[in-house]
Image (cartoon, rainbow, N blue to C red):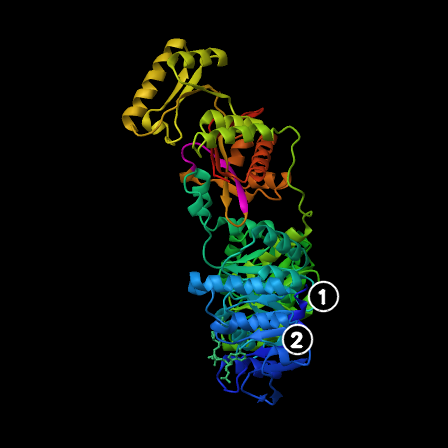
């Protein structure tokens, strides 16, 4: 059933409606009336016959029609019985205001589950519980107990915090920002931000979707819905709190590098959601996105009447991944000729402190005519000669003349500039007090535009030559041996079954066997202690490199076993792993760690023993990872410089690396029981790769 009914409900019952002013349920009835809601309102109260001049009914069973929405505002102990009654009487949707559920602990959670079960049983959808209600300015309807009603507008705001919702509402009125829909999500027992984003994506009255959330509970659906919504309109989210990814995956390098909040970062980016870093950021971005179309590209021109703010803005341009536009000769000649000799004609254009609107107009006209400029930032500081209002009018004139350029204002000052700022904002030119939010907005708008123009996400990568059965067999043996950490030989087998070029590793339990394996592989070889408990083998003297003869292998076996038993006597040692000594290549890491909400995350970057120190690793979700995206993630790292051929070295095999990353993503998607993978180091050669050390941890599925 569509959640549209929540907004354009034909009738609303308020259960627990009270005559007493100051009670939440009384406020809801008043809000419904004062919002201009045109449907039928039914206050429900067993003791009253009339509330706020409306006929009251003892229960939903007594209503003359089946209502679309019932707002439940009775104490928690009565909610289940009231919800069941709603179900019995054909109510389609519930807005459960009442608190005292999951947020109070285990008992509350149990009651919340029962409430959800009732919704499922009767086919009702529910907002809340523990929410402040919702409103739509275009219907109009207000089933909340918030103070006041927002101005009509085109920004939808969904908030997991009721307090944040009512606060923002109040602020929006003062700031003159209009909203289309406002929803307090509460405990999200049934409906969550995902459902509301999905609906708002197709709502003709909503241009920008804003969310304040503390978590995402259904990662795959979020990615899917938000990804589709973001292709239609900007979805901007402020997410507070941290995820559990870090805690889950502390033992691998990849897990440690991922940290606690990275999954949200990459998930949002991958589905085109714009992440606001602060609440201020959230609303600044909303204003920019709602008011102005995205500039056509990253090249920014600045026109200012003072040097300092021009420099601040330029610094921000660089820091935010934008570029300062380089003017063509024609533009420079025109500026030189038309501006005073002391003016700065290169970007930023300094029209000087005595500039009035005519000089701004002239400079803007020349700058905007330049094809190397995508957007222009007009900075005004209140000097004695300045005419801010006229300057704003000049900017608006230029916007009309150059409709394809992005126009933004940073009017640095207080009351002297307030009206001029307001004039710009009203005409659809985002104008802030300081340059930072302006540049941040342009940067996010350009990025968002790139996302919208990028090809629709390809399907997950598929490979013909992978051997799922071989991997299953290895995992079966590992679990039978009561282990979750694979031995090197097992991990190498898993990697090879998926076409990741791991150097073969054989397990030897006696010195003689080690020599036999070395003879098969060919010298020189490496031997490493084989024990799932010893993660850092070098530290316990458990690794011997460059062994060139049977004697050396024999002795190394004894030495490695003795060292390990001496330094880690409690660790079970299975023998040693014998591996061919591979030639050195560019040292990389590829890895995987699994996030609770968003699934496997794939990492690639600079490898070796200093990975955690250098932290040159780029991440993506395995889900929906395309070849282009893999290439992008590699180019984001400094390791890419090495791969392209550093200091006269020949370039390394980028294709082979991209292939290995894709195959690791496939492996992680195919086997949800794999919790972590570290392939470190991977040597990249001019041709091909060699994965030297593969670590895999699994869970009992
Ligand atoms: N059917 C209809 N009305 C009922 C009823 C029922 N089964 N059971 C009780 N009522 C009536 C009561 O008689 C009362 O009306 P009255 O004022 O005429 O006596 C009315 O419902 C409200 O009940 P009351 O006991 O006065 O509760 P309350 O108004 O003090 O509190 C809540 C009710 C829902 C507001 C409160 O329990 C609550 O959860 N508050 C927190 C809400 C919140 O913070 N939500 C999250 C925001 S982010």
| Image height of 451 relative to 633, above or below | below
| Left or right relative to 15: residue 8 | right
Counting residues from the start of the chain, the first of labels 2 and 1 encountered is: 2
Label annotation for residue 583: none
| Residue 701 position in % (x across, y down) | 51, 40
Q: How far apart are the two marked residues, 2 and 1, measured between alpha carbons?
A: 52 Å
| Left or right relative to 527: residue 328 | right
Give the residue number, with chain letter if any, for mark 2.
Answer: 67
In which quadrant of the rendered view does residue 344 lie?
bottom right
> Which residue occupies 53% across, 53% down?
320
| Image height of 542 relative to 289, above or below | above
Q: Secondary structure at mark 2?
A: loop
| Left or right relative to 627: residue 476 | left
237 drawn magenta: no
> Which residue occupies 28% across, 27% down?
567
| Residue 292 position in % (x across, y down) | 64, 64
Crowd class of label 2 (few under 14; some 14 to 19; many from 20; radius 10 Å):
many
Is there any visible trace of residue 287 in the rendered image?
Answer: no
Q: Secondary structure at mark 1?
A: helix
> Which residue occupies 59% across, 66% down?
126
Is there any visible trace of residue 512 in the rendered image?
Answer: yes
Q: Magenta stretch mostly in which secondary structure? A: strand
Give the residue number, with chain letter if any, for mark 1.
Answer: 401
Read off the magenta span.
599-611
603 drawn magenta: yes
* Relative depth, front residue between 146 and 67: 67
């Amino acid at each position: 059933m569509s959640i549209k009914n929540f907004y354009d409900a034909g009738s609303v019952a308020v259960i627990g409606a009270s005559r007493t002013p100051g009670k939440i349920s009384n406020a809801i009835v008043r809000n419904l009336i004062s919002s201009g809601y045109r449907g039928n309102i039914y206050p429900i109260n067993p003791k009253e016959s009339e509330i706020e001049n409306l006929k009251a009914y003892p229960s939903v069973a007594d209503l003359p029609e089946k209502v679309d929405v019932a707002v439940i505002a009775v104490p928690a102990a009565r909610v289940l019985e009231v919800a069941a009654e709603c179900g019995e009487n054909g109510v389609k949707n519930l807005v459960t205001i009442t608190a005292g559920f999951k947020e109070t602990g285990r008992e509350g959670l149990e009651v919340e589950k029962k409430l959800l079960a009732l919704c499922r049983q009767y086919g009702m959808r529910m907002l809340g519980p523990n929410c402040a209600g919702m409103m739509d300015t275009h219907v109009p309807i207000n089933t909340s107990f918030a103070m006041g009603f927002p101005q009509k507008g085109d920004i939808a705001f969904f908030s997991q915090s009721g307090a944040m919702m009512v606060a923002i509402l109040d602020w929006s009125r003062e700031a003159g920002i209009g909203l289309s829909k406002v929803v307090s999500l509460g405990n999200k027992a049934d409906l969550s931000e995902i459902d509301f984003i999905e609906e708002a994506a197709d709502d003709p009255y909503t241009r920008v979707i804003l969310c304040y959330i503390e978590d995402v509970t259904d990662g795959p659906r979020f990615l899917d819905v938000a990804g589709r919504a973001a292709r239609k309109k900007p979805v901007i989210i402020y997410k507070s709190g941290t995820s559990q990814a870090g805690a889950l995956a502390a033992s691998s390098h990849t897990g440690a590098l991922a940290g606690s909040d990275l999954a949200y970062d990459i998930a949002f980016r991958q589905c085109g959601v714009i992440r606001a870093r602060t609440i201020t950021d959230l609303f600044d971005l909303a204003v920019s996105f709602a008011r102005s179309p995205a500039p056509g590209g990253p090249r920014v021109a600045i026109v200012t009447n003072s040097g300092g703010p021009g420099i601040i803005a330029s610094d921000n341009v660089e820091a935010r991944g934008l570029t300062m536009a380089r003017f063509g000769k024609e533009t420079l000649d025109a500026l030189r000729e038309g501006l005073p000799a002391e003016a700065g004609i290169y970007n930023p254009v300094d029209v000087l402190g005595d500039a009035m609107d005519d000089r701004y107009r002239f400079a803007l006209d020349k700058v905007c005519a330049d094809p190397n400029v995508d957007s222009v930032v007009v900075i005004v500081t209140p000097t004695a000669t300045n005419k801010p209002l006229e300057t704003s009018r000049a900017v608006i004139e230029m916007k009309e003349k150059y409709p394809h350029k992005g126009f933004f204002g940073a009017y640095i000052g207080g009351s002297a500039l307030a009206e001029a700022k307001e004039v710009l904002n009203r005409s659809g030119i985002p104008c802030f007090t300081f340059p930072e939010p302006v540049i941040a907005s342009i940067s996010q708008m350009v990025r968002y535009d790139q996302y919208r123009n990028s090809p629709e996400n390809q399907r997950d990568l598929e490979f013909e030559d992978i051997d799922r059965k071989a991997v299953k067999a290895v995992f079966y043996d590992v679990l039978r041996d009561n282990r979750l950490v694979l031995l090197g030989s097992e991990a190498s087998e898993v990697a090879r079954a998926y076409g990741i070029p791991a150097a073969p590793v054989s397990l030897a339990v006696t010195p003689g066997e080690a020599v036999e394996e070395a003879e098969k592989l060919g010298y020189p070889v490496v031997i490493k202690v084989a024990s799932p408990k010893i993660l850092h083998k070098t530290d316990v003297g458990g690794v011997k490199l460059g062994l060139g003869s049977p004697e050396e292998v024999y002795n190394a076996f004894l030495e490695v076993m003795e060292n390990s038993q001496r330094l880690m006597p409690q660790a079970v040692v299975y023998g040693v792993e014998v591996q061919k000594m591979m030639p050195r290549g560019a040292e990389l890491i590829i890895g995987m760690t699994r996030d609770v909400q968003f699934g496997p995350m794939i990492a690639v970057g600079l490898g070796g023993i200093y990975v955690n120190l250098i932290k040159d690793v780029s991440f993506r979700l395995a889900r929906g990872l395309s070849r282009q995206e893999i290439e992008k993630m590699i180019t984001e790292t400094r390791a890419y410089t090495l791969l392209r051929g550093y200091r006269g070295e020949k370039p390394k095999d980028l294709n082979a690396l991209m292939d290995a990353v894709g195959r690791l993503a496939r492996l992680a998607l195919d086997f949800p029981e794999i919790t972590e993978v570290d392939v470190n180091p991977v040597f990249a050669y001019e041709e091909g790769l060699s994965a030297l050390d593969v670590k895999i941890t699994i869970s009992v599925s």
